[in-house]
Image (tube, helix red, strand yellow):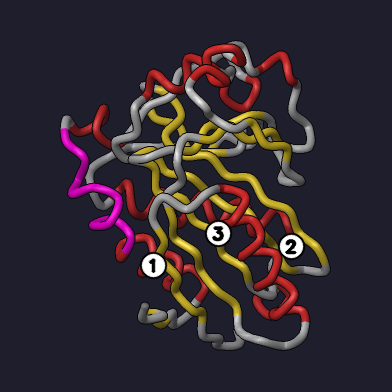
Amino acid sequence: MTDLDLELIELDALPYEDGLELQRARRELVLGGGPGALFLVTHPPTVTLGRHASRASVIGRLELERRGVPIIETERGGDVTFHGPGQLVGYPVLDLARYGLGAKRYVELLGLTLNDVLAARGIVAAWDDAAPGLWTAHGKIAAVGVHIHRNVPIHGFALNVDVLLSWFDLIIPCGLARPVTSIRRELGHDAGGVRALRPAVVEALRARLHLRPHVNAP
């Protein structure tokens, strides 16, 4: 497996559409032979619709509009989801062909990466092929959705750390009438919060992909 450096880029309160532009720009760089990146971010409250989403899944549209929460259509897989403070969002942008990964294996690898982080903190979760993401006995704790063009993905994963779970009452997450959970709900605390968990995610992904990310100093 070829070794490859990933630039680690950490951004907080990043507007969703700005983050999408950063990913698309990085994908073009990777397609031109440049280095990949791992974006670890948080977003202001945002609802996104995947390419298979039903608008009927946004059941609290009027309340979302009242709160000024944007509803954004995207090209990623999956249905509707929520992003907001207290959620660790990751966007790896890299050449999958260099790792012998197809779309299905890559999505599963993201799930394994997050499961490694959860298991190290005593949280038992399982991957569900029918509803891509990680699930505990209390509900969905992490979502995965990507868009791949010429073997380079954008979008990625969202891990619920201490996100306000009532936000999910305004949508039908992933189009499924199933509950959502978080690290805080599972453990009774937030395991240090999003920033404290980022290094664990980096190490878990590096172990899974044999990468050596380096921090892009501000």
Q: Is residue 195 magenta?
A: yes
Vertical relation: 86 (above or below) 212: above
Q: Residues within 10 Å of mark 2 (few under 14, many from 20)?
A: few
Residue 11 or residue 201, whichever sits in front: 11
Region of the chain picked out in magenta, as a range: 189-198
**Which one is in front in this view, the residue at disc 3 or the one at disc 1?**
3
- Say which residue appears at 41% left-offset and 50% top-offset: 13
Locate residue 149, reporting x and y percent: 81, 63
Q: Circle 2 sits in a helix, a strand or a loop, which is it?
A: loop
**Quadrant (top left, top right, bottom left, bottom right) of the C terminus:** bottom left
- Say which residue appears at 62% left-offset and 27% top-offset: 174
Mark earlier in primary sequence (3, 1): 3
Locate residue 49, reporting x and y percent: 69, 33
Rounded to the nearest whole Å, what is the CA distance between mark 1 and mark 2? Answer: 21 Å
Give the amino acid type for the residue marked by disc 1 in the picture.
Val
User: From the viewer's perspective, is 117 left or right of 97?
Assistant: left
Q: Which residue is mark 1?
A: 202
Locate residue 77, reporting x and y percent: 72, 42
Vertical relation: 181 (above or below) 214: above
**Which one is in front in this view, the residue at disc 2 or the one at disc 3?**
3
Q: Circle 1 sits in a helix, a strand or a loop, which is it?
A: helix
Q: Which residue is mark 2?
A: 102
- Say which residue appears at 74% left-offset and 62% top-offset: 102
Q: Which residue is mark 3?
A: 91
